[in-house]
Amino acid sequence: MIDTRVLVVGGGPGGYVCAIRAGQLGLDTTLVESGRLGGTCLTRGCIPSKALIQAASRFDALTRHVGDGHMGISLAAAPRFDLAQAVRWKDGIVERLSHGVAGLLKKAKVRVVYGHACFSDAKTCTVTRSDAPPLRIRAEHVVLATGSVAAPLPHLPYGPDVLSSTEALALTELPRRLVVVGAGYIGLELGIAFAKLGVEVSFVEAQARILPGYDAALVRPVEQWLRTHGIAVHVNTRALGIERRADGLHLSVQTGADPARTIACDKVLVAVGRRPCTQGWGLEQMAIDMNGPFVKIDARCHTSMRNVWAIGDLVGEPMLAHKASAQGEMVAEAIAGHRRAFDPVAIPAVCFTEPEIVAVGLTPEQAKAQGIAVVTGQFPLAANGRALTMDAGADGGFVRVTARADNHLVLGIHAVGAHASELSGEFAHALEMGAVLEDLAHTIHVHPTLGETVPEAALAALGRAIHI
Ligand code: FAD
Ligand code: NAD
């Protein structure tokens, strides 16, 4: 039996950050993790997917140097790709980062218990461990951070041929043909990476366009990339089921009210969203109010049960690692008695597609829908010197700033383009600091950098861009 001040369940980016901060604040803290420290994000999400995307992009870039070459660099033969080796490289990164998290928890004097926690009441759980007897933990404060799992499609159950992102990221052999069901974050990020590696990829998306959650103008360059690479995108289309025939797998799909048809393939990746992990750990014993499928929280991430807190994917959209971490840090400080609330101006989001999409704050349409009159300014990456020297800028990319028309307060900054993800911090910072267009326009940016597009877009909104 352990008595602890703070019990954190789940060692993902929400839970482990919460535990580290609680430890730093001198709170006696216990973290329970049933899998690996780092959670979905580190083990089978953000980091593994970005490793695969990086390997695929490097391979794709190298293929442009074959023959006559490019930038003065030519390769005599086409590069070869070994997925098993790439997966080992990715696993090495995961291993290193997971050990890093263990080290940080140790430094913060957090007690880590490996096993599956199951609650018998709101403050007591039993941890089932593979290498030791069950352990009961009683806590003054409980932080629930159990994350999420891939949502299945009932008529397309996961199996050897129907993969979730977890299995797709652990493949050791490339399929020849891959159908991706769901052209959202995961489907597009992984689908594009596999396409760059030479896999014949096609997308099946239920909505009228890919990445339906993003502003259409931002998605256009991605649609253009898919088109120029001959990748089939079936929108308004639903997957009905899978059939194995003598000549291989056939996914049956239906577009609108058209008759059903089949797409021949070797593997199917289902990426139709994720659902909170609310089952199998005694949530029902805790008498906590729910918000649809998610745990209901207030502005401090406090649940309806006294001293029970919840963070990350478990509490709803956006299901992003940095949101989980920010909530985790905030909750630890709230438990320590600090006056804190989770009230960001914006939660930045990046889709690591080709090209990358960045969204921070309101789009012009969202602002208008709130009755706010806006001015916008847009600057193309094709007019940015650094983008061209990085062999980018030809993909239709741009940075767009949206501000209030009356006082120029910046409401949103959005971008699409190669390497645009690295600008997301600057965008978020501007919004959090309450920047106005003139702040962005008059901040001297290093030349030549992609960041120069930000003052240029702000100047464009003020009607006086220099380089366009
Ligand atoms: P999780 O990371 O899911 O961690 C929850 C942890 O709780 C798990 O380790 C689990 O084992 C543990 N757990 C659950 N129940 C119990 C129990 N009863 N007892 C003990 N332990 C338990 N987000 C981004 O911001 N950027 C990205 O680029 C990005 N890429 C992604 C790519 C993929 C393929 C996927 C699947 C997700 C991606 N995400 C990305 C989303 C990101 O991974 C999640 O938003 C984030 O991991 C949520 O953190 P969390 O702490 O809430 O939960
Ligand atoms: P998603 O919500 O981004 O996309 C799911 C897509 O599947 C949508 O476009 C939806 O219209 C479509 N869809 C739903 N049902 C369908 C059906 N029956 N047939 C065909 N299409 C269908 O979900 P995801 O891609 O699974 O990712 C899950 C979550 O993981 C994301 O919401 C995000 O929070 C997180 N994530 C983030 C990143 C990142 O930050 N770069 C990367 C990957 C995942």
Image (cartoon, grey):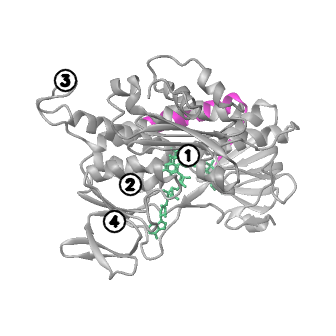
- Near mark 2 (Cα within 10 A), the count class, few <14, some 14-19 or many ≥20, is many
Of the residues under marks 1 and 3, which one precedes in the sequence?
1
Q: Which residues are the magenta region?
A: 93-115
Q: Which residue is mark 4?
A: 161
Alpha-carbon distance for marks 2 and 1? 19 Å
Most foreground residue, 22 or 443:
443
Instruction: Report the residue at 78% width, 63% height from top.
Output: 120
Alpha-carbon distance for marks 3 and 4? 40 Å
The C terminus, quarter of image: top left
Instruction: Report the residue at 48% width, 41% height from top.
Output: 47
Alpha-carbon distance for marks 1 and 3? 42 Å
Q: Which residue is mark 2?
A: 168
Instruction: Report the residue at 45% width, 37% height from top.
Output: 398
Alpha-carbon distance for marks 2 and 3? 33 Å
Q: Which mark is residue 73?
A: 3
Q: Main secondary structure of the magenta part?
A: helix
Residue type, mark 2 in image: Ala
Of the residues under marks 4 and 1, which one precedes in the sequence?
1
- Near mark 3 (Cα within 10 A), the count class, few <14, some 14-19 or many ≥20, is few
